Image: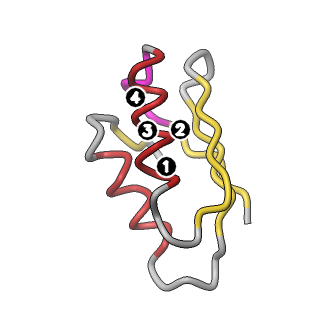
Amino acid sequence: MEKKIYVVGLDSDTNKEKAEKTVKAITGVKSVIANCEKSQILVDFDETIVDIENKIKTALESTSLTVLN
């Protein structure tokens, strides 16, 4: 399942790389593409894994980003 996640704080390549690396480390995440210009992160993940969307949100917030949706 692909999902666009809109965030606040994705304003540098450092934040982009940190967000991508943190989310990619979650079991079940297939790919992550962060876009600073659009303040969004496109995540492809296995939706059958219990609570994976909350894990992704928590991971993003641990990198000092604020998740909007």
**Residue carrying label 4:** 8
Q: Distance between the Cα atoms at labels 1 and 4?
A: 11 Å
Say whether marks 1 and 2 touch (CB < 8 Å). yes
Residue count near mark 2 (Cα–Cα under 10 Å), binned few <14, some 14–19, many ≥20: some
Callout 1 environment at 10 Å: few (<14), some (14 to 19), or many (20+)?
A: few
Q: Which residue is mark 3?
A: 19
Q: Is residue 26 above or below residue 14?
A: below
Is residue 25 highlighted in magenta? no
The chief SS type of the magenta part is loop
Total count of labels: 4
Q: Earlier in the sequence, mark 1 or mark 3?
A: 3
Task: Name the secondary structure under disc 1.
Answer: loop
What residue is shown at x 48% (from left), y 27% (from top)? 16
- Say which amino acid is labelled 4: Val
Label 3 secondary element: helix
| Residue 30 located left or right of residue 68 | right
- Kindly check if marks 2 and 3 are in contact, taking CB atoms under 8 A apart as contact: no
> Residue 59's x, y, as percent?
35, 53
**Mark 1 in CB contact with mark 3 (< 8 angstroms):** no
Name the element at disc 2: strand
Q: Residue furthest right?
A: 1
Residue at mark 1: 69
Whichever of labels 1 and 2 marks the residue nearer the N terminus, that label is 2
The magenta-colored residue range is 7-11
User: The disc labelled 1 sits on which kind of residue?
Assistant: Asn
- Mark 3 or mark 4, whichever is nearer to me: 3
**Place of residue 38 in the rendered image (x, y in percent of width and height, measured from the top left):** 62, 22
Looking at the rendered structure, which numbered label has been put on residue 6? 2
Pick the residue in front: 52 or 4. 52
